[in-house]
Image (cartoon, grey):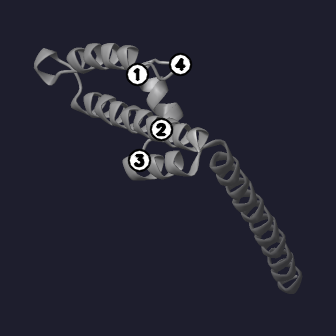
Amino acid sequence: QAKYLAQIILVGAQVVGRAFMRALRQEFAASQAAANARGRTERPQSAAASRIIGISLQEAQQILNVSNLNPEEIQKNYDHLFKVNDKSVGGSFYLQSKVVRAKERLDEELRIQAKGDKEKGRKAET
């Protein structure tokens, strides 16, 4: 009987191991697909800025509650959120730093767009 019990345990372990490996492969494939999809939606400079600053454009827009890249609206929301989260008025330094990073990311995106517009203007002239 011990022999059968050992075989059952061994077969069970093999089944669980195979299921785990299959799930791991599926998760890896899904992760790769998501990374590729993200890469296609962002321009190369924008994707690089997201990696360098550590925050995506979408996340930065959500933090500062802006739907389009309007510099005045970004600055207004940034000023408000920065003051509200100031540690001296009982705010959170962590949230304040997230607001700063979001502003940096949006400023970088505006710079990238301005550079792209400038290059398009040059190409149109020639």
Check residue 54 in the rendering and tell me which mark sits there, or answer none: 3
Amino acid type at mark 2: Lys
Residue, disc 4: 67
Q: Decide which of tag 4 and tag 2 comes sooner along the chain.
A: 4
Describe the element under mark 2 as helix, strand or loop: helix
Describe the element under mark 4 as helix, strand or loop: loop
Q: Indicate which label's residue lies in the foreground, 4 or 2.
A: 2
Q: Indicate which label's residue lies in the foreground, 2 or 1.
A: 2
Q: Indicate which label's residue lies in the foreground, 3 or 4.
A: 4
Contact flag, marks 3 and 4 (Cβ < 8 Å) = no
Contact flag, marks 3 and 2 (Cβ < 8 Å) = no
In percent of the image, x 38 and y 47: which residue is there? 53
Amino acid type at mark 4: Ser
Residue 119 higher or lower than 97, as above or below: below
Q: Decide which of tag 3 and tag 1 comes sooner along the chain.
A: 3
Looking at the image, how many numbered discs can be counted on the residues? 4
Decide which of 92, 55 is in the foreground and name it.
55
Residue, disc 1: 64
- Rate crowding at label 3 as few (under 14), some (14 to 19) or many (20 or more) other CA atoms within 10 Å: few
Q: Decide which of tag 3 and tag 2 comes sooner along the chain.
A: 3
Amino acid type at mark 1: Leu
Q: Indicate which label's residue lies in the foreground, 3 or 2.
A: 2
Contact flag, marks 3 and 1 (Cβ < 8 Å) = no
Taking the image as shown, residue 70 lies to the left or right of residue 94, namely right
Residue, disc 2: 118
